């Protein structure tokens, strides 16, 4: 059975940089999986991507030697079971608010006696190049479990959450984190206030020995965050990369027609 190279690289302290897939495109995933990025995350939380499309995306990503991850809509057992049985090699669970929730998420990713994942499916073993028997025996060691910190209330108890056994990485959703820090009148946090919260998260993850990552929007930002000690880093999304490239072309050739508004997505 194939190893999960991203999971093992993170354990060794090596940064792993990938991107988000928000378009629900099997063809797009197939191309991107061959660019050299070690992982791609299929976003099922904020997109139209359904489980059948996601299953095909997991397959073309895995066949290219890249690691297919998925951000599930919620950390529920049923979502976790479904995406893992369809071949995802790891999950990203959004908005984890306490240690009990983190424990339930970890349990759903592992078979008894360690966890409570139900035995079944077939695509999972195929993506690992294994028999079903081998998959059931070794999957607990290879599934990557990532939880998101996206609310300031979770930051306050970050050490307690990150101490839960079985968490492989923390991932910060900076937009939701900033939204949770708005003042009563809706005023957003300052750049320094948000940065302070980010550094508190990173420090807590380091204390608990868990790799930490976040979403950034440029190569320069990724390099800067890696230098700070962040490891699991997403740069943009395939949608943003596409729009930025097309908008740059439009502005250069047809500035009178281009507003560049879509490049903000």
Image: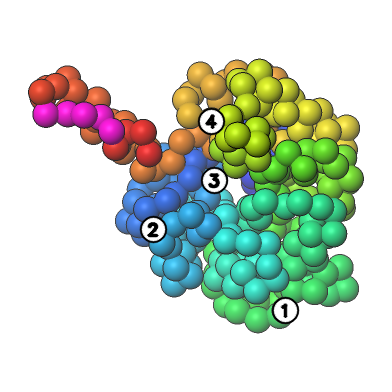
Discs 2, 3 touching: Cβ within 8 Å: no
> Which residue is labeled 1 in the image?
118
Where does the magenta region start and end?
257-261
**Res 88 → quadrant:** bottom right
Mark 3 crowdedness (10 Å alpha carbons): few <14, some 14-19, many ≥20: many
Q: Of the residues tagged 2 and 1, which is closer to the observer?
A: 2
Residue at the image position 39 percent from the left and 58 percent from the top: 24
Give the total number of marks visible in the rendering: 4
Q: Report, in whole angstroms, how far the alpha carbon at label 2 lies from the one at label 3.
A: 16 Å
Mark 4 crowdedness (10 Å alpha carbons): few <14, some 14-19, many ≥20: many
**Badge 2 or badge 3: first in the primary sequence:** 2
Residue at the image position 44 percent from the left and 57 percent from the top: 47
Disc number for residue 24 = 2
Q: Report, in whole angstroms, how far the alpha carbon at label 1 lies from the one at label 4.
A: 35 Å
Q: Can residue 129 be seen here?
A: no
**Badge 3 or badge 1: first in the primary sequence:** 3
Q: Report, in whole angstroms, how far the alpha carbon at label 2 lies from the one at label 1.
A: 27 Å
Disc number for residue 39 = 3
> Which residue is labeled 4 in the image?
216
Q: Report, in whole angstroms, how far the alpha carbon at label 4 lies from the one at label 3.
A: 15 Å
Q: Report, in whole angstroms, how far the alpha carbon at label 3 lies from the one at label 1.
A: 25 Å
Position above or below: 199 against 86: above
Discs 1, 4 touching: Cβ within 8 Å: no
């Amino acid at each position: 059975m194939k190893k999960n190279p991203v999971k093992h690289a993170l354990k060794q302290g090596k940064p792993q940089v990938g991107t988000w897939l928000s378009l629900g495109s099997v063809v797009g995933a197939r191309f991107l999986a061959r660019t050299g990025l070690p992982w791609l995350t299929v976003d099922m939380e904020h997109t139209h991507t359904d489980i059948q499309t996601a299953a095909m995306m997991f397959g073309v990503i895995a066949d290219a030697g890249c690691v297919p991850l998925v951000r599930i809509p919620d950390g529920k057992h049923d979502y976790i079971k479904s995406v893992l049985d369809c071949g995802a090699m790891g999950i990203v669970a959004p908005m984890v608010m306490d240690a009990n929730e983190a424990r339930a998420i970890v349990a759903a990713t592992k078979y008894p006696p360690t966890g409570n994942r139900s035995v079944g499916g077939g695509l999972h073993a195929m993506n690992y190049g294994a028999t079903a028997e081998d998959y059931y025996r070794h999957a607990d060691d290879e599934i990557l479990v990532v939880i998101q910190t996206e609310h300031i209330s979770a930051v306050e108890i970050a050490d307690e959450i990150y101490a839960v056994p079985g968490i492989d990485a923390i991932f910060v959703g900076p937009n939701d984190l900033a939204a949770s820090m708005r003042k009563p009148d809706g005023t957003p946090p300052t750049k320094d206030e948000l940065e302070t919260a980010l550094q508190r998260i990173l420090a807590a993850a380091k204390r608990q020995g868990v790799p930490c990552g976040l979403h950034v929007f440029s190569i320069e930002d990724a390099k800067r965050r890696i230098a700070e000690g962040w490891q699991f880093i997403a740069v943009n999304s395939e949608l943003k990369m596409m729009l930025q490239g097309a908008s740059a072309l439009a502005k250069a050739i047809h500035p009178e027609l281009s507003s560049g508004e879509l490049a903000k997505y």
